[in-house]
Amino acid sequence: MDLRTIVITGASSGIGEAAARTLAQTGDTIVVVGRSAKRTQAVADDIGADYFIADFERLDEVRDLARALKSRYPRIDVLANNAGGIMGPRALTMDGFEKTLQVNHLAPFLLTTLLLDVLVSSEARVINTSSVAHKLFGKLDIDDLDAGKKYSANRAYGNAKLANILFTKELHRRFAATGLTAAAFHPGGVATNFSAGSASFMRFAYGSGMRSYMLTPAQGAQTLVWLAVGQPGLDWESGGYYAKRKTARVSQQANDALLAADLWERSERMVGPWLGTSSPTGE
């Protein structure tokens, strides 16, 4: 089997780092992307990977990341959109979007869309890290994606994780015929610092003695690794949502095909200034 190029965002710590360390053992070219230059370079140097720095709170950095990846890698076999987290009080990024939505959904949507020509030509797989929080807290109002009317940290996070699944399903619908595949997954309750900036109960749960009952990052990364190395159509089906390397149930909204299509179109308009005019539509 030819060696592949695997890009993992949010790979300077947590399940992204754990997945990168595991996948590096395959001999594939691993590309780690993170916000912290120090931590990202340390992970890359330790496993012999390439690395790039990008802050998903800035869409210009996401756009620059896509340009750099396309310049460096004529083929990308796996794109793992793993960067994300739960935030604190409602805040807007410098780009004007609610921070939870941008970091967890709009930034990976932009990155994937900017890379679509390479991903399609590579018959790549796109793996999106979602969460069971989409069922617990997600109730997406397509006319209030920035949560200007009603906000809580948990709801914003649940909606962003719901958006990850809807994006996965619409990506499959638009591009499956080209050979591109997509999947979303829930890593489980993993002892990481993803909620460090939040004031929700998750911050206290993840920062307390409950951590001893949680999965390690390596355990949480198992489904991501499985999706990266398994065979679409044999081990897993494109457009699906997985947990513990098995198909998992999703909320009613996550199965709404019209909502998925509407979210794609609205997301495309929201990030339009960073997309330019070369984005393929898949239609």
Image (spheres, grey):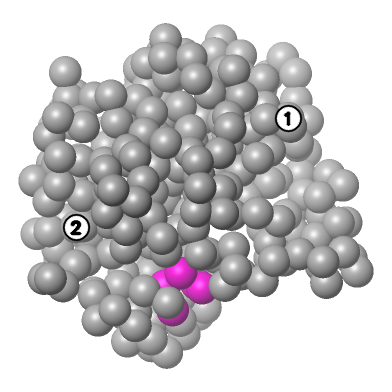
**Residue 18 colored in magenta in the image:** yes
Q: Is 129 displayed left or right of 114 in the figure?
A: right
Q: Where is residue 170 in the image (x, y as percent from the top left)?
A: 35, 25
Q: Where is residue 108 drawn, in percent x and y?
A: 41, 43
For the point 63% across and 50% down, which residue is it? Answer: 85
Residue 198, above or below 228: above
On the question of residue 107 being in view, the answer is no
Residue at the disc numbered 1: 137
> Is 171 one of the magenta-colored residues?
no
Mark 2 vs mark 1: which is more N-terminal? 2
Quarter of the figure with the N terminus: bottom left
Q: What element carries label 1?
A: loop
- As rendered, which of 131 and 246 lies closer to the eye? 246
- The Cα–Cα distance between marks 2 and 1, rounded to whole angstroms, is 34 Å
Which residue is at 37% across, 16% downward?
261
Report the disc number at residue 76: 2
Residue found 38% across the figure and 28% down from its top: 169
- 10 Å neighbourhood of mark 1: few (<14), some, or many (≥20)? some
How packed mark 2 is, by other alpha carbons closer than 10 Å (few <14, some 14-19, many 20 or more), is: many
Identity of the residue furthest to the right in this view: 209
Numbered range of the magenta stretch? 17-21
